[in-house]
Every structure is written in C-alpha cells, then in structure tokens.
Image (cartoon, rainbow, N blue to C red):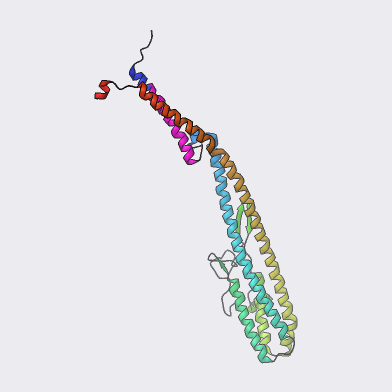
Amino acid sequence: MSERITPAMVTSATLNDLSSSLASLQRTTDELSSGRTILEPSDNPFGASRVIDLQSQLDGLSSYESNAQDGISWENAASSAMSNINEVTQRVRELVVQSANGTNNQSDLSTIATEVEQLTESVKQDANTQYAGQYVFSGTATTTAPYEQGAGDEYKGNAEAVARSVGPGASVTVSTNISTLLGNGEAAKDGKLLDTLRTIVAHLRGGTAEDREALGTTDLKALDGNLETLSQLQAVAGSANDQLKAALTRNEGLQTSITESLAGVEDTNVAATSIAYANEQAAYSAALRAGATIVQESLLNFLQ
C-alpha cells in the first residue's frame, strides 16, 4: 500500500531542510566571529578538556611570570640601595685615610666626624629602601623600617627569607639580610658597618694619639671587612636577579609553546571556514528559492 504525500508533509520536509541548512550556516558564522572551532564542550569533548588543561597551564605560567617580574623589581631596588651604601662607605674610607695621615688638626677632624655622621644616616636611609610599599631589607617584616634615623642603630627586621615562586616547585629568595652588613650599632660592638662608623666618629672626636692611630689601623681594617661583606651581599643579589631573569625567559618560552598548542586545538581555520561559509550561504539561498517554489500557499492558508 503506497503512502499518500500530502502538501503538509512536503511543507514539513522543506522546512526541516531549511532549518538544518540555516543551523549549519549559523554554526559556521559563529566559528568565524569567535575564531574558535569548539563553541560548546559537546562539539569536541576531548578537545574541550585539552583546552581547559592548556588554559590552566597558561594561567599558572602567567602567575609565575608576574612573580618573577616582581622579584626582579625587588632585587633592582635592593641592588640600587646596596650600590649607594657602597659609594657612601668608600667615601668614609677616603675620609679615614685622609684623617690618618697626620696633617689635620682637631678642628678638621671634628668637621670630618660631622660628615661621617651624616653619611651614617645616609646608609640607614638606603637600608630603609622600599619597593611597592614594602621594606626590602626587613625580611618578612616588610611593614617595619629596618633602622630608625638618629642615634638608635638596632635592626628592627628579621632574618626570615622572602622568596618568589617562579615555577612548579621552584622559588628564588629575593631578601637580603642587611643586618649581616650593618649590624646593631656601637652598643652591640659587633664590628659591623654601623658599629664601625660610630667608632670612627668617636676616634675622630677623641683627639688622642691612640685615636689617630686607630683610624689608620683597626678602623680602616674594619671598613675593608665591611666592604667585603657588602660585596658578597651584592653578588648574592646579582645571582638571584639572574635566576629570576632565567625563570622569566623560560616561562615566556613555555607560554609561547602552550599558546601555539592551544591555537592548534581550538582556533578556526579561517580560510577553510570562509569557503564553507560561502558554500553554505549559497546553499541556503538556493534552498529558500526552491522552498518558495515547492511550498505554495493554498487559498485557505492565505485566508487564514
């Protein structure tokens, strides 16, 4: 028994074909406008999971990159401060050598003592250097100034390390324990820079033969020892800076590689998709014209 094909069946089939053609065209349009082939996870479940994994890796690398950049800026601030301290200490050394040559009277030595006191305050100002509102030489006590201006020379920070995470399981220490150089002043008798500077001032103002002899012997030797300690701290900071830059370069390379992999998974082939769009648009236009010919409005439909 043959089935009778009614006008309603023809209309339904035609409309279904038009709807399917329109859906394909819309899909291609969305791919072109978004630049992505995976618009919904159901489009490609494996590809979608791969995209999520790669994007997660990119987000992690972006965080590591930010940490490395921050660490480099931190180290630059610390290195600049230590360079200033080095210049000041070298100036004090020149003054000590000048004072020990025996050609200066007590008035001259007192004037030099005043300059050394001013240079001592300059050293403490550099020790209180901040980056992004944090004291770089205070250990983890980043809201506390390492040293107070004035007579008090006690270190107010701590020796705990500050580090920046630059990769999975990898971190770089960016803190510098400045107290190993500056110490806690004359009261501590620790032989470190602040103690040495205060002692030099005392010998400059003392005026005795022993004071003058100390300037050219023990004081000068102590200064040279302090400069050696400073050189070691600068070397460590430089090494940390190199590690951070290497980590930054490595992260940038990984980001480029992962970005390329991500593009291979989800990016649209614009040329191929554009051709498909043109073909589908032509097919849909042809289907509309054919549908208009096939599906004729009856008088009853028109009256309705």
- Report the front residue among 195 and 19: 19
Instruction: In the rendered view, tell whether residue 5 sits above or below residue 291.
Output: above
Residue located 73% across and 82% down the image: 97
Which residue range is magenta in the image?
A: 13-34
Residue 258 lies, in percent from the top left, at 59, 44
The answer to whether residue 155 shows anywhere in this view is no
In screen coordinates, is 84 left or right of 225?
left
Location of residue 286 by image quarter: top left
Residue located 64% across and 57% down the image: 245
Residue 275 lies, in percent from the top left, at 51, 33
Q: Magenta stretch: residue 22 in it?
A: yes
Instruction: In the rendered view, tell whether residue 204 sits above or below residue 21.
Output: below
Q: Magenta stretch: residue 45 in it?
A: no
The image quadrant where one finds the C terminus is top left
- Name the main secondary structure of what is drawn in magenta: helix
- Report the front residue among 248 and 125: 248
- Report the front residue among 219 and 157: 219
Residue located 58% across and 74% down the image: 125
The image quadrant where one finds the N terminus is top left
In screen coordinates, is 39 left or right of 209?
left
Taking the view exactly as shown, the residue that stands out farthest to the top is: 1
Residue 66 lies, in percent from the top left, at 57, 55
Residue 294 lies, in percent from the top left, at 36, 21
Instruction: In the rendered view, tell whether residue 280 sits above or below residue 149.
Output: above
Residue located 70% across and 69% down the image: 231
- Report the front residue among 168 and 53: 53
